[in-house]
Image: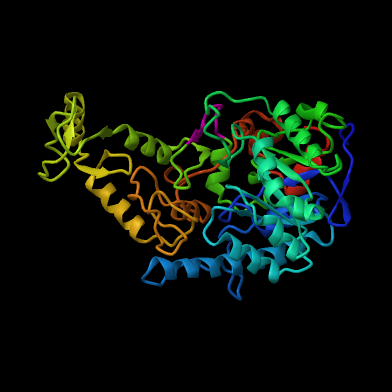
Amino acid sequence: MFKGLKPILYGGREVWPLVEGGKGVSATNHASSGAWAAAGGIGTVSAVNADSYDPEGRIVPQVYHALTRRERHEELIQYAIDGAVQQVHRAYEIAGGAGAININVLWEMGGAQRVLQGVLERTKGLVAGVTCGAGMPYKLSEIAASYGVNYLPIISSGRAFRALWKRAYSKAAEWLAAVVYEDPWLAGGHNGLSNAEDPLKPQDPYPRVKELREVMREGGIPDSVPIVMAGGVWNLKEWENWIDNPELGQIVFQFGTRPLLTRESPIPEDWKQRLMTLEEGDVLLHRFSPTGFYSSAVRNPFLRALEARSHRQIAFTKEELGDHCFQLDVGVGGKKNYWVTRGDLLHAREWHAQGFTDALKTPDETLVFVTPDEKSQIRKDQADCMGCLSQCAFSSWADNEKNSTGRLADPRSFCIQKTLQDIAHGGPVEHNLMFAGHAAFRFKKDPFYSNGFVPTVKQLVDRILTGD
């Protein structure tokens, strides 16, 4: 047992202060989270478009039959509730009374409040807590408290937590089980990097977590309410000075990337094998997500194609203005109201000659050049939108009365639901979004995984408990 590590009381029982990070759209399911809880930790079922099963135990494909986005959005919410409920029941059975089961939701996912309420209504007594990030989930405390369930907000700064506490959480303080600090430079998936922070200049998490604890103390929150350190956590030896540290109070550690490479992990074999080949720097912190948030994923051909698309981009004006005194003569079908600089005109002609013959408008008065096949796929994906986000830059969907953000759909982004469903269910790992934390390169270097060894969840938790 690693020095100083002690069980904590959570959900009415003693558990190890080790949390399995919840990874959405079928990358964390009942098998991995149930096994994590059975090993004595806190398992996390993803309630983000989780899989459901038919009577023979086969995954039910999430096929959308409705003609309108609003109707497809209703189908999506039902899929999400039914899937998460099945996942929770299965995870609870696997746990066998050990550890605890949380669920994880993204506040900016489509119908988040309805999904959360629908799941908690049908899993009473099974869910210990709800982790929630990707936005400012003010209503999380109210919803969780109404079902007698703990809540664990995911934030990336003391400032963000202060706003949540003052506006809402202080009214349901008794159900605040922990605060998850997710390092915006190191965590996988969507990150809470603010506009005031530089994506290229990571900050040491220690002073940021220390500041978070000070904010919590200001609110009268006792040090026994843990801060969960998430993002960049690989082993406990590297965090030894965080354990039993009076400046930080009780600390719990979340592991998001390491549980991907276990036998119970539901991700396909190709994804697991690819994780073992990553080098340092292969995970990119980028801003292509239709959520508008930064996110971290493997820089595979899928991401490189998005980078290249954004590089094939020029600004335009609708009338001759300053340096924009050259009429664009490629990519716009003979339309004459696109004025560009001379340099951009030459770039556009070059891209056109390379086969990027179609120019698509962005919301920022720019044009991106794509192939006819790319254009066709972009338009189809936008038309097939099922409202998986509260608002989507790619399709311009919004969960409001008009079902629109009021902005032009952005061809520089992508359909996140489509690609995450595809990779999670066996689609090509090089041509889909592959979320991962920035420590994923350590699979290749860590002797625990030598000769391609893939542990069970129990073996991984036992290994973590030694400090390695």
Q: Quadrant of residue 276?
A: top right
Determine the residue located farthest toward the bottom in the rendered image: 55
Please tell me which residue is depicted at 58% across the width and 61% down the height of the picture: 50
Relative placement, left or right, of 193 versus 466 is left
For the N terminus, give its image quadrant: top right
Relative placement, left or right, of 20 versus 358 is right
Decide if residue 255 is in sight here: no
Q: Nearest the camera: 355 or 448?
A: 355
For the C terminus, give its image quadrant: top right
Please tell me which residue is depicted at 75% across the width and 36% down the height of the picture: 215
Please tell me which residue is depicted at 69% across the width and 62% down the height of the picture: 143
x and y percent of residue 191 in the render? 57, 40
Determine the residue located farthest toward the front in the rendered image: 166
Q: Quadrant of residue 234?
A: top right
Q: Nearest the camera: 347 or 397?
A: 397
Decide if residue 341 is in sight here: yes
Bounds of the magenta segment: 277-286
When the figure is inspected, residue 346 is found, relative to residue 289, above or below; the finding is above
x and y percent of residue 178 in the render? 77, 46
In the rendered structure, does residue 279 fall within the stretch colored magenta? Answer: yes
Q: Quadrant of residue 351?
A: top left
Q: Main secondary structure of the magenta part?
A: loop
When the figure is inspected, residue 314 is found, relative to residue 426, above or below; the finding is above
Please tell me which residue is depicted at 60% across the width and 48% down the height of the picture: 136
In the rendered structure, does residue 360 fall within the stretch colored magenta? Answer: no
x and y percent of residue 428 in the render? 45, 48
Instruction: Count the labels in the image.
Output: 0
Q: Nearest the camera: 110 or 146?
A: 146
